[in-house]
């Protein structure tokens, strides 16, 4: 199975986007750590691990199809935040952007009639639905609690874990 140069390039770029997300979530986790909000910090450290796993899925796929792995340059994440809402809002925007990147990859793979790549990307299509939904729920929680009420979010996360079931 060979990949077109365009698809190889785009899949390698996605390694950078996923690693960029991982670094961004570490930066956000440290922001919450600094605010003594350990559950929010834990949530983002865990998200950072997930993003690294996503990057490694792309690495493994490229290896599996004998395509070159070329880890791209990764821009520095944003490190300063004025509020929890800003930090979580950035995360939601990031997930929406990644969703579009995955859709673009699917389009490329379909254009190449590369069915193995389309199937590989299927997992990410579903994952992005979950990630956007989770981040959107978390943003709703943070907005509802307000900056002064973030301990309610902490309690919620300690009790419920990921806010995927939170009502909007
Ligand atoms: Fe790997 Fe959250 O996108």
Image: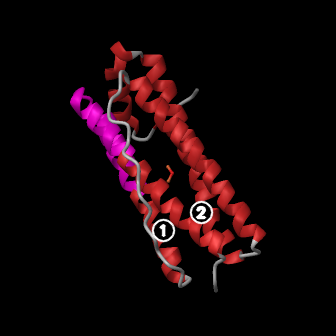
Does residue 61 appear left or right of residue 49 in this picture? right
Which quadrant of the view contains residue 115? bottom right
Q: Which mark is residue 152?
A: none
| Residue 79 is covered by the magenta coloring | no
Q: Residue at x 43, y 54 (%)?
A: 51
| Foreground residue among 108 and 139 | 108
> Is residue 165 in sight in this rendering?
no
Q: Secondary structure at mark 2?
A: helix
Disc 1, disc 2: CB below 8 Å? yes
Q: Secondary structure at mark 1?
A: helix
| Foreground residue among 93 and 165 | 93
| Foreground residue among 156 and 65 | 65
**In this view, 66 is above or below 27:** below
| Stretch in magenta | 24-51
Q: Image quadrant for the N terminus?
A: bottom right
Q: Image quadrant for the C terminus?
A: top right
Tag 2 residue = 123
Which quadrant of the view contains residue 9? bottom right
| Residue 44 is covered by the magenta coloring | yes
Q: Which mark is residue 57?
A: 1
Residue 18 location (% of width, % of height): 46, 55
Label 1 neighbour load within 10 Å: few <14, some 14-19, many 20+:
some
């Amino acid at each position: 199975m060979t990949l077109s140069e365009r698809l190889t390039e785009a899949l390698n770029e996605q390694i950078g986007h996923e690693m960029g997300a991982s670094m961004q979530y570490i930066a956000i986790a440290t922001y919450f750590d600094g605010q003594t909000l350990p559950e929010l910090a834990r949530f983002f450290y865990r998200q950072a691990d997930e993003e690294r796993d996503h990057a490694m899925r792309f690495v493994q796929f490229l290896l599996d199809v004998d395509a070159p792995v070329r880890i791209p340059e990764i821009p520095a994440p944003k490190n300063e935040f004025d509020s929890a809402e800003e930090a979580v809002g950035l995360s939601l925007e990031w997930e929406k952007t990644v969703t579009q990147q995955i859709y673009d990859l699917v389009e490329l793979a379909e254009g190449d009639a590369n069915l193995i790549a389309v199937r590989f990307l299927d997992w990410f299509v579903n994952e992005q639905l979950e990630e956007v939904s989770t981040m959107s729920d978390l943003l709703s929680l943070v907005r509802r609690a307000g900056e002064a009420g973030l301990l309610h979010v902490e309690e919620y996360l300690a009790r419920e874990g990921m806010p995927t079931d939170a009502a909007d």
